Image: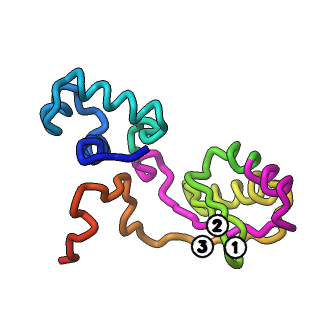
Amino acid sequence: MALDRIDIAILDTLQKDGRISNAALAEKVGLSQSACSRRLDILENTGVVLGYHAQLSNGALSHRMTVIVHISLSGQFEKSLADFEAAVKRCPNVLSCHLMSGEYDYILRIAARDLEDYERIHKQWLSAMPHVTKINSSFALREVIDRAALGIAPGSADTPLV
């Protein structure tokens, strides 16, 4: 789907405020409410907008530890990948999982309450996942940035760093 400047403005606004009313969104992007609603329906129905959610604080939920985990599998056969991906989707502590090129097959971002909780996750979940041959865990010392929004506004890529 080709996105025009109005679509981009809608998406940029929604990333900043997913709870904005249709009336406020329409005003912000310069459309009537009905035209804005139609555009938003198209963006949702074509899969450009995948959903709306609240960004929660892991720390406020007592998950103060972020662990980056590199996983190697016994092979990158279709069945091995599918088995692993089905298992990783069931682990509630996995925040994100990416199939990778390079040395490791997957990189996971995991939220844990503390070191003991991560040990539990490692034993009960990660080590038990199918086809896993190597697990390499790194513990984040401090979060520097965790973007919820992609820079898509016109000219945002050209904005110099200060």
Q: Residue under label 3, please give it.
A: 138
> What's the amino acid at mark 2?
Val
Instruction: Indicate left or right for 133 with 5 as reference.
Output: right
Distance from disc 1 to disc 3, alpha carbons, whole Å, reads: 7 Å
Decide: marks 3, 2 in contact (CB < 8 A)?
yes
Q: Residue under label 1, please give it.
A: 136
Distance from disc 3 to disc 2, alpha carbons, whole Å, reads: 6 Å
> What's the amino acid at mark 3?
Ser
> What's the amino acid at mark 1?
Asn
Q: Taking 56 as reference, is 141 above or below it?
A: below
The range drawn in magenta is 57-85
78 falls in the magenta region: yes
Label 3 residue SS = strand
Position in image of residue 124 (x %, y %):
77, 52
5 falls in the magenta region: no
Q: Residues within 10 Å of mark 2 (few under 14, many from 20)?
A: many
Image quarter hosting the C terminus: bottom left
Q: Residues within 10 Å of mark 1 (few under 14, many from 20)?
A: few
Q: Residue under label 2, please give it.
A: 69
